[in-house]
Image (spheres, rainbow, N blue to C red):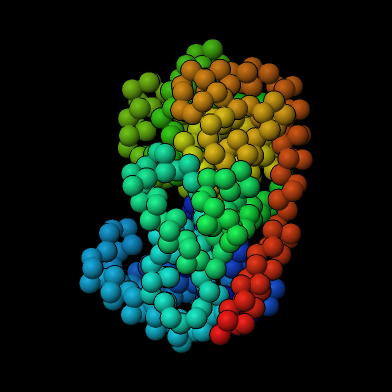
């Protein structure tokens, strides 16, 4: 089977979407399938995560994917994509996120190749962004998808009835951790670390996490906050840290290729997001035995954290006071962190990689068979 995956860009991007698409492509190659990757990237783009050499990467090199394309650029992209698909003849195309899906569905119209729309966020994201005005258009475009994949069954009711027969729920794979955290045992110098991992963006809402930590910093002088990741809000967050006089206690080290070491040497995890899809960083933290904290009204977070067992859900979505209360409960109780950490490891067992990849493989085979019958 030959499968083409499409994403807007992969150039040195260390996010969850990029990691998931690379993991899935690498696994399909290992299982004997041919895999192509198509992105809007420029010709010198390099992946942050390691791609298997067998994967054929088509970098369109037509306009910078970081900026909105002109009408002429979109037309040129359409011609280029159509030529690539005709030449490579994939059995199926998988588009990560709705923007690439809509573009590819238009560019490949009439070629007879089934296209899967892989949603990577909860539909609740429309409640927080200007994309809300396009929600109806996006959902109507999904009528043209061979399948629509979502990451949690709890998201299904938010989709209209006309899409229900083509929705397939496939969670992200969560590999077992090679090292486990010791949430109750202090680190070097008797210090404890509150960790978060994610893009420094509006979605992750890190300003709230920093403010909540500031409420507790004087009462817990042995604790530090580390946020791994980079993004457009770095300068804003750095200014906030300075204004709160937390420069010695809160650090933003940027991205890393040794994230497992950070998980294993930390004591508590928090993801303060406004919304999620299937938050890889949170799942990985749980797999390493870190108890976790997030907001109870954040889609994706509430699906992963078992409140009171593997972590704590702070009331609402985005409240500094509520988050500070949840953080303090675990910062002050090492034994509770230890017991929740053990439960956290168990909680991600249903997402073992092999069954998840097999579900993807079955879906692709099914869509390919259906297209073969039609044509």
Residue visible at 58% across and 61% down? 166
Quadrant assignment, res 268: top right
303 vs 66, left or right, is right
Horizontal and vertical percent for residue 205? 43, 34
Residue farthest to the front, as pictured? 161
Count of marks, rendered view: 0
Q: Is 150 or 228 nearer to us in this picture?
A: 150
Horizontal and vertical percent for residue 328? 58, 18
Q: Is 369 or 299 nearer to us in this picture?
A: 369
User: Can you say whether 24 is above or below 264 in the image?
Assistant: below
Residue farthest to the top, as pictured? 219
Quadrant assignment, res 104: bottom left
Q: Is 34 or 288 nearer to us in this picture?
A: 34
Residue 287 appears in the picture as rendered: yes
Horizontal and vertical percent for residue 153? 63, 47
**Quarter the N terminus occupies:** bottom right
Horizontal and vertical percent for residue 198? 49, 43
**Quarter the C terminus occupies:** bottom right
272 vs 192, left or right, is left
User: Can you say whether 136 is above or below 272 in the image?
Assistant: below
User: Can you say whether 28 is above or below 356 in the image?
Assistant: below
User: Can you say whether 262 is above or below 238 in the image?
Assistant: below
Residue visible at 44% across and 55% down? 139
355 vs 330, left or right, is right
Residue visible at 57% across and 29% down? 296
Q: Is 127 or 79 nearer to us in this picture?
A: 127
Residue 10 appears in the picture as rendered: no
């Amino acid at each position: 089977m030959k499968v083409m995956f499409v994403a807007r860009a992969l150039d040195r991007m260390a996010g969850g979407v990029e990691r998931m698409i690379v993991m899935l492509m690498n696994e399909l190659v290992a299982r004997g399938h041919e895999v192509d990757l198509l992105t809007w990237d420029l010709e010198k783009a390099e992946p942050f995560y390691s791609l298997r050499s067998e994967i054929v990467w088509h970098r369109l090199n037509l306009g910078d994917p970081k900026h909105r394309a002109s009408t002429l650029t979109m037309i040129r992209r359409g011609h280029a994509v159509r030529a690539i698909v005709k030449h490579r003849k994939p059995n199926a195309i998988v588009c990560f996120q709705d923007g690439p899906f809509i573009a590819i569905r238009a560019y490949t119209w009439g070629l007879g190749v089934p296209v899967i729309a892989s949603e990577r966020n909860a539909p609740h994201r429309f409640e927080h962004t200007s994309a809300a005005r396009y929600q109806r258009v996006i959902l109507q475009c999904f009528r043209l998808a061979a399948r629509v994949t979502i990451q949690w069954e709890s998201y299904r009711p938010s989709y209209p009835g006309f899409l229900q027969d083509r929705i397939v729920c496939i969670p992200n794979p969560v590999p077992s951790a090679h090292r486990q955290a010791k949430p109750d045992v202090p680190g070097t110098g008797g210090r404890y670390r509150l960790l978060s991992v994610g893009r420094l963006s509006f979605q992750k809402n890190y300003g709230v996490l920093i403010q909540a930590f500031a409420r507790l910093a004087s009462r817990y002088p042995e604790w530090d906050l580390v946020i791994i990741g980079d993004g457009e809000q770095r300068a804003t967050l750095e200014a906030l840290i300075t204004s709160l006089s937390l420069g010695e206690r809160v650090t933003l080290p940027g991205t890393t290729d040794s994230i497992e070491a950070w998980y294993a040497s930390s004591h508590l995890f928090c993801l303060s997001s406004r919304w999620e899809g299937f938050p890889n960083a949170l799942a990985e933290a749980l797999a390493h035995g870190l108890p976790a904290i997030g907001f109870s009204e954040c889609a994706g977070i509430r699906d992963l954290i078992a409140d009171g067992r593997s972590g704590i859900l702070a009331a609402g979505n985005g409240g500094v006071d509520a988050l500070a209360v949840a953080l303090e409960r675990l910062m002050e109780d090492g034994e509770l962190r230890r017991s929740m950490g053990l439960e956290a490891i168990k909680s991600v067992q249903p997402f073992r990689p092999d069954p998840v990849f097999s579900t993807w493989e079955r879906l692709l085979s099914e869509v390919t068979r259906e297209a073969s019958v039609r044509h």
